Amino acid sequence: MNLKPGWLLLLSVCALVWSVPIDRNVGVEEEKEEVQEENGDTGLYYDRYLREVIEVLETDPHFREKLQTANTEDIKNGRLSKELDLVSHHVRTRLDELKRQEVSRLRMLLKAKLDSTNVQTLQMDHASLLKQFEHLDPHNQNFEAKDLELLISTATKDLENYDAERHEEFKRYEMLKEHERREYLKSLDQEKREKEEKRLLDLKEKHRQHPRVNAPGSVAQLREVWEETDGLDPQEFNPKTFFKLHDTNEDGVLDEQELEALFTKELEKVYDPKNEEDDMMEMEEERLRMREHVMKNVDTNKDRLVSLEEFLKSTEKKEFNNPKEWETLDTKPMYTDEELQRFETELRDKEEELKRREATLLQEQELLKERGKALEAQRREYQQAVLEMSQRQKDQQQAADGQPPAGPNGELKFQPETKTEEDKDLTGEKVPAAPEAEAQNNLPAEPPQNLPIHT
């Protein structure tokens, strides 16, 4: 997708292409080949939604025509947003779908944020929570003129603060690097520490030994690009021709990406990704500083774009031919000692907080383990009770049917029976006598009668 100057003017979104230096040594046929475009990221958390809305709106001929003729005031005061009512039904339907997808994504982000902070809510009020996002209207499910107006104003405001946030992020990166260096040296013994300190100082000094860097936007810097990148005679340098050569998307302006592409040769003097002493994060910060320097001196209407008229006027200034020497990042510190101390204090506080959270999580883990064991024991008790109850029900049913009871595994259980006299004769066991017979046996014996007398 290739944004028109109107969108660039409004959103401060540089053209959605990464500008590439032109190699004038290639053949004519190769020059005519279309350069593959790559989408750049604005850094906004709603970047994809912003780009998709612009892409859909540009498919409507009426809106595209209004956009091309709109000026900065028409865009910023919301007059362009009112043209949304005149776009085709297909475009409106697609915009409605984009908004529903964005709202769904924001709801997922909110849920993830609440889950990470352990916030317990009985019922999540998405409408109230969505109010914290300023780039859309949460009260209407469809994409209306107000949504476009909010998207424009929010993107403009956020992009104005984006560079400042990038500088602050880089400063924190540098302070973290210094903190880690100090902590690493503390972990070494004296001999190794002295040796490592010397090695780091040598690397730092080696990084400083680089060729002189031309001030960005100066005649020396532009002539170098004209000669080494464009392959043209430096004596034939022409600002107007230079501008047209590097307006790679031919929209009549140099956007931020096209400007930053001009600084590649200067940055290569200082940074090489193969060198241990060169930090590529520092290179990107240097590129940002160069672009800001040019914009400050050339972009007179502060629309984050450089027109041909602005560019030609900048070449008439004294600074263009006699600029001050450009100071690279290694010439001055990025932070003060007080800022570093506050940063390290903040790190320690965060480490302590993480340790406390870790201890709390370990305690909760142990409690969960104990609770799991108790639940497992309770489950086994319930399972045993269910088995016993089922067994009793089976026994009762079988008893009612005249069948012997069954065991836990379904085996039959027979009850022992009382043995009779016949069982005694067969087994040889003594069977207890009946009470009447036992009583007769206990009577005193009578003397025998009518026995013969022996002499």
Image (cartoon, grey):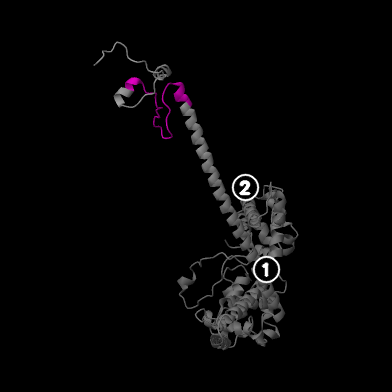
Q: CA distance from mark 2 to mark 1?
A: 32 Å
351 falls in the magenta region: no
Up-down relation of residue 81 to residue 214 (above or below): above
Name the disc covering residue 162, or none.
1
Res 48 seen here: no
134 horizontally vs 392: left or right: right
> How many numbered discs?
2
Main secondary structure found in the magenta portion: loop
Farthest residue, direction left: 455
406 falls in the magenta region: yes
Q: For this rendering, which residue is in front, 64 or 97?
A: 97
Classify mark 2: helix, strand or loop: helix
* Residue drawn at (64%, 62%) of the image: 357
Q: Which residues are magenta?
A: 396-423
How crowded pointer 1 is (Cα within 10 Å; few <14, some 14-19, many 20+) is rated as some
* Residue drawn at (46%, 71%) of the image: 30
387 horizontally vs 262: left or right: left
Q: Position of residue 431 (x, y in %)?
A: 37, 24
First along the sequence among labels 2 and 1? 2
Q: Position of residue 413 (x, y in %)?
A: 40, 29
Up-down relation of residue 260 to residue 364 (above or below): below
Farthest residue, direction front: 455
Res 110 seen here: yes
Q: Position of residue 142 (x, y in %)?
A: 67, 47
* Residue drawn at (39%, 21%) of the image: 433
Farthest residue, direction top: 450
Name the disc covering residue 62, or none.
none
Q: Say which amino acid is labelled 2.
A: Thr
Q: Say which amino acid is labelled 1.
A: Tyr
Marks 2, 1: nearer the viewer? 1
Name the disc covering residue 93, or none.
2
Q: For this rendering, which residue is in front, 327 or 395?
A: 395
